[in-house]
Image (spheres, grey):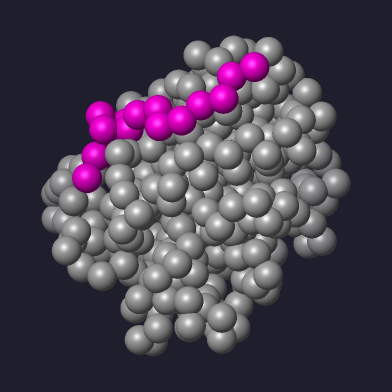
Amino acid sequence: MRASTQERSNVSLLAEHISDHLSVFVVAEVTDVQRPANGGLRLLNYADDAVCLADGKRLAGLMTNKHDLYGTGFAGGKIVARASRPNAVKEELINVTADLLHSLDGTMITGCDLNTNLEDMERLMALTPHVLAAVGSPVDASAATAHGTIGAAEAVLGGELNAVDPGRALVHGCGAVGGSVARTLLDHGWTVFCIDLDPRRAAIPGATPIQPDAPWWDLDLDLLLPCSVSGLITTEMSHRLRSRAIVPAANAPFAHPPLADELRRKGMVVLPDPLVNAGAVIADSIERFCPAAWRSARPEDVYKFVRLEVRNRARRFLQQRDQGLTVDAALKQVAAHPGLDPIGLSFGEV
């Protein structure tokens, strides 16, 4: 198990489509249909193809860590697309992605990511079966990620939300994941500060909205929950952060990976992001490997399963850290054993 911010050396480019207005890269571990790669389809206005591909490799490495950690039955992968006008290429993107997935013959499976949504996945699924995005299901992948994030926070707090004293939390990014996290904390009596580039999303009833350019890192907090962009926490911010713990739903929340260890040395609890934000891939594992239970399950059953699995693994990670293990060593101790059945099968047993 590698640290959460490192790439895996066996992540490579599997397929590509390049044009002057749309480039699409499938990046993943070399795998097969028995253990397909899994990762979302991300569409951004990258500076150029090289930047897009580099981001794909970084993200595929993070997905590899997450799948290995929870034993989902998948390998790590990502599909990244570059377009100067993302909204203008959606139809072409769907067609190109379907062709690329077909060319890989089931060794890569995708779902939603930045600037792609469930409607896009429905259109993609009409062209290719190699999609896992809870299409046609009442389960919401973002809600699963949010419940996993709450489970990780409960591990840090030492108990379930309804059994611990409410504190102060800041949620950075109040979209589908962050908004759900904020509302859950509010429901349990927490003081919650919300930041989002869109002020309407930060205006959650009961929360205190903060302007994006305000120095939020100076607030006294029990929990900081980054649910927005990668590289959010800069060196300057980290020197001034006053939070008991950081529980990141966002991938790679630090602008410079060593900042996380610097904060840990100062006594702050910082959970590795693959430990926190695995809710969607756990749900994918249920959908792929336990389809009968998936079809009959209520959303709240899936969310409860995700929350418990993340809470337990994060708790074991913190116990290993308390015994003096490094972050890497602790992750290795709590990672699923490669020979075990995918985690999704255990949902059927529950």
Q: Residue furthest right?
A: 200
Q: Residue at x 43, y 51 (%)?
A: 106
Is any atom of residue 259 visible in this view? no
| Relative horizontal placement of residue 97, taking residue 119 as reference (left or right) | left
Q: Residue at x 67, y 22 (%)?
A: 22
Residue 98, percent across and down? 60, 43
Is any atom of residue 316 visible in this view? yes
Q: Nearer the viewer, residue 205 or 277?
A: 277
| Relative horizontal placement of residue 199, taking residue 231 as reference (left or right) | right
Q: Residue at x 55, y 32 (%)?
A: 80
Classify 4 as above or below 51: below
Quarter of the figure that contains the N terminus: top left
Asked whether 159 falls inside the magenta stretch, the response is no
| Relative horizontal placement of residue 68, taking residue 150 as reference (left or right) | left
Residue 275, percent across and down? 37, 53
Residue 288, percent across and down? 45, 67
Q: Nearer the viewer, residue 229 or 81?
A: 81
Classify 169 as above or below 258: below
Classify 70 as above or below 264: below
Could you tell me how many numbered marks the image carries?
Answer: 0
- Where residue 173 sits, quadrant-wise, is top right
Q: Residue at x 23, y 57 (%)?
A: 335
Quarter of the figure that contains the C terminus: bottom left
Residue 71, percent across and down? 30, 60
Residue stretch in magenta: 1-19
